[in-house]
Image: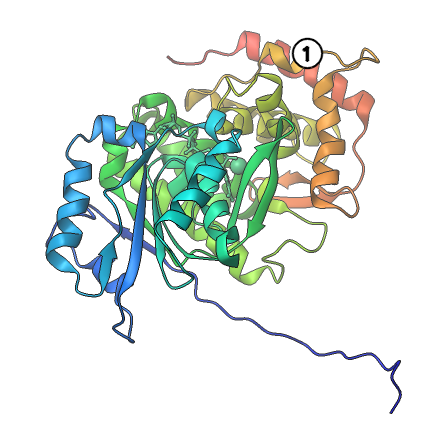
């Protein structure tokens, strides 16, 4: 036998990715969660529920409803403890001790790979819970119940999780498909306006790279979205989630092993801006800035018409997004804008060749492998001037 002969085989792992849409998930008469949790083997499964503190503040009866839901309705599900409350938001996603706290709970309650961790909250907390669930015991079943516009349309319908480290976004994390995602429209009612609107930028993003008719829909509904009309928000979340899931399931690269990352259009500068603002600027707001910058850059390069670029910037403003932040002018040691270092960090995070999505039309993203630093600086200045002239409704 040749002992130096290598062993090689292909391993295929298939999984079902499910995003449910409902309202009032913990009403006794709502069967969705019960159906998701029922396992054919009928053994007892443990369940730990973690809730974003902000959600319980605005929904004071939530904890009781969750407890009652499981007391009354489940034979093979054991809620191991009353729902655990944790603070949400980006600062917590940057606080690694929260991950350890979750590991301690998993250990204390003896959760195993057949147990469930159900997280309810904004994208930041769900990213953190998802990371802890994916890594403890190499993976515990994880159910996500996102409670913000952004997380229902984008952050939580994907298969990634992460926490921030070294001040860098998503420095640690895994690709781990959740057991299920459940979007409950009722949670959005209590969301402050700023966070309701914050998620619109991800919808504009995915429309710009994939779906011109969705972009037109957002344009037509911009005033209603600005006023946070619930029915329109639901339509936008639905289409946004659909487009994200479609990409994950059909792009051929769900684990992002290649260099392309079209769903991160506008994100190279957005992530850096969040960091430069010490997370004062929300992810959604930073993405709106990032979209505006890359849109203007695409126009300056001649890939996109000035008219289309103007449509994009006007839409972002009508939705209530500022197009520029002074943090974007912070300089690095060499005297150039620190924000441009976002390009290097973006490539470093993904590996491979620098690959940035740009626009050659509304609904038409394409990839470039080189960004002109001088032109980016001019674009940054031009965006600043543009933003001073444009009216952003309050
Ligand atoms: N994993 C992914 O693929 C992915 C994709 C996009 C974005 N993200 C991440 O998602 C995060 C942003 O998520 P977000 O926009 O949901 O922000 P967030 O999680 O920071 O939530 C915003 C604020 O609203 C509070 N909150 C949440 N739900 C509420 C409710 N119903 N009522 C009242 N308050 C509520 C939170 O406690 C927080 O203070 C970022 O960290 C971003 O990087 C992840
Ligand atoms: Zn994003």
Quadrant holding the N terminus: bottom right
x and y, in percent, of residue 249 in the image: 52, 61
Question: On the picture, is 380 further left or further right than 5?
Answer: left
x and y, in percent, of residue 231 in the image: 25, 38
Question: Does residue 275 show up?
Answer: yes
- The residue at 63%/59% (across/down) is 253
- The residue at 65%/15% (across/down) is 328
Closest to the observer, 208 or 254: 254
Residue 59, quarter of the rendered image: top left
x and y, in percent, of residue 389 in the image: 55, 8
Residue 32, quarter of the rendered image: bottom left
- The residue at 25%/37% (across/down) is 187
Compared to residue 131, the image places residue 289 above or below, namely above
**Is disc 1 surrounded by few (<14), some (14 to 19) or many (20+) residues within 10 Å?**
some
The residue wearing badge 1 is 329
Could you tell me which secondary element the residue under label 1 belongs to?
helix
Question: On the picture, is 29 further left or further right than 329?
Answer: left
């Amino acid at each position: 036998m040749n002992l130096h002969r290598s062993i090689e085989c292909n391993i295929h792992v298939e999984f079902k990715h499910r995003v449910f849409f409902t309202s009032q998930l913990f009403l006794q008469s709502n069967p969705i969660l019960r159906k998701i949790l029922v396992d054919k083997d009928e053994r007892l499964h443990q369940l730990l529920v973690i809730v974003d503190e902000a959600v319980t503040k605005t929904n004071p009866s939530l904890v009781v409803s969750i407890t009652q839901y499981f007391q009354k309705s489940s034979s093979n599900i054991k809620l191991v403890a009353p729902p655990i409350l944790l603070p949400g938001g980006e600062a917590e996603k940057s606080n690694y001790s929260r991950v350890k706290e979750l590991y301690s709970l998993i250990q204390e309650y003896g959760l195993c790979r057949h147990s469930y961790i159900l997280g309810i909250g904004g994208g930041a907390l769900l990213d953190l819970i998802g990371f802890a669930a994916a890594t403890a015991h190499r993976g515990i079943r994880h159910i996500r119940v996102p409670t913000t516009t952004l997380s229902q349309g984008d952050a939580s319908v994907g298969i990634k999780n992460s926490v921030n480290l070294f001040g860098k976004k998503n420095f640690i994390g895994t690709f781990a498909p959740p057991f299920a995602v459940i979007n409950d429209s009722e949670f959005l009612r209590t969301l402050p306006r700023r966070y309701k609107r914050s998620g619109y930028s991800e919808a504009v993003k995915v429309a710009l790279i994939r779906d011109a008719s969705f972009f037109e829909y957002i344009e037509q509904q911009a005033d209603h979205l600005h006023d946070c009309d619930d029915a329109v928000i639901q339509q936008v979340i639905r289409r946004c989630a659909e487009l994200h899931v479609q990409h994950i399931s059909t792009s051929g690269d769900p684990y992002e092993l290649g260099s392309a990352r079209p769903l991160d259009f506008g994100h190279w500068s957005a992530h850096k801006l969040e960091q430069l603002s010490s997370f004062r600027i929300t992810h959604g707001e930073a993405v709106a800035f990032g979209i505006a910058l890359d849109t203007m850059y695409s126009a300056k390069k001649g890939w996109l018409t000035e008219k289309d670029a103007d449509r994009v910037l006007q839409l972002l403003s009508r939705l209530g997004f500022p197009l520029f932040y002074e943090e974007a002018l912070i300089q690095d040691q060499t005297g150039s804008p620190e924000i441009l270092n976002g390009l290097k960090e973006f490539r470093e995070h993904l590996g491979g060749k620098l690959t940035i999505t740009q626009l050659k039309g509304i609904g038409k993203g394409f990839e470039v492998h080189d960004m002109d630093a001088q032109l980016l600086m001019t674009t940054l200045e031009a965006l600043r001037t543009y933003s001073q002239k444009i009216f952003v409704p309050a």
